[in-house]
Image (cartoon, rainbow, N blue to C red):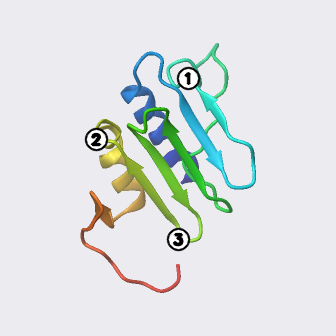
């Protein structure tokens, strides 16, 4: 499922990116990296060196202007996606993959309380 989530996010970022955008990836214990989302990840291009979520690390990927991005929190088992244009591209697919959206615009929506997996 993580591969599918990553592919959805990658497609959404590429669809929302503007020429000249840079996507920065920040991980807690590893040096960050950056890519041009319109010039990476397709045949004949450099590989897509970014992750939306990892099972053992906090990951943030964000555009230089903070217009859109994701934040994966492995301890909470949560993924935050922000930026109106990015959300428009990924909302339906991510909801189908991951289930109930817990917050929109920072406000709770249909929270489900649970303990454990």
**Residue projecting furthest to the right:** 30
Which residue is drawn at the image coordinates 30% and 75% (left, top)?
Answer: 111
Q: In the image, is residue 57 above or below residue 17?
A: below
Task: Measuring from the top left, give residue 44's x and y in whole percent.
Answer: 64, 13
- Are discs 2 and 1 less than 8 Å apart at CB? no
Which residue is drawn at the image coordinates 43% and 16% (left, top)?
Answer: 19
Mark 2, residue position: 84
Task: Measuring from the top left, give residue 35's x and y in whole percent.
Answer: 60, 27
Q: Quadrant of the N terminus?
A: bottom right
Q: Secondary structure at mark 1?
A: loop
Gap between marks 3 and 1 measured at Cα: 29 Å
Mark 1, residue position: 36
Q: Which mark is residue 28?
A: none
Task: Measuring from the top left, give residue 37's x and y in whole percent.
Answer: 52, 25
Gap between marks 3 and 2 measured at Cα: 23 Å
Graded by Cα atoms within 10 Å as few (under 14), some (14 to 19) or many (20 or more), the crowding at tag 1 reads: many
How many marks the image carries: the answer is 3
Which residue is drawn at the image coordinates 42% and 84% (left, top)?
Answer: 114
**Depth check: 90 or 22 in front?**
22
Which residue is drawn at the image coordinates 52% and 83% (left, top)?
Answer: 116
Mark 3, residue position: 76
In-image side of 29 versus 55 (left or right): right
Counting residues from the N terminus, which is met first, the one under dot 3 or under dot 2?
3
**Residue projecting furthest to the front:** 65
Counting residues from the N terminus, which is met first, the one under dot 3 or under dot 1?
1
**Depth check: 106 or 13 in front?**
106
In-image side of 82 versus 21 (left or right): left
Write down the quadrant of residue 49 in the picture: top right
Graded by Cα atoms within 10 Å as few (under 14), some (14 to 19) or many (20 or more), the crowding at tag 2 reads: few
**Residue projecting furthest to the bottom:** 115
**Depth check: 83 or 100 in front?**
83
């Amino acid at each position: 499922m993580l591969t599918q989530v990553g592919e959805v996010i990658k497609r959404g970022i590429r669809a929302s990116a503007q020429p000249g955008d840079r996507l920065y990836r920040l991980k807690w214990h590893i040096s960050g990296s950056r890519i041009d989302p319109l010039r990476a990840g397709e045949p004949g291009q450099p590989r897509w060196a970014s992750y939306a979520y990892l099972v053992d690390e906090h990951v943030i990927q964000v555009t230089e202007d903070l217009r859109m991005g994701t934040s994966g929190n492995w301890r909470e088992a949560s993924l935050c996606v922000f930026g109106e244009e990015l959300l428009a591209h990924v909302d339906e697919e991510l909801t189908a993959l991951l289930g109930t959206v817990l917050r929109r615009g920072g406000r709770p929506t249909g929270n489900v309380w649970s303990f454990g997996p």
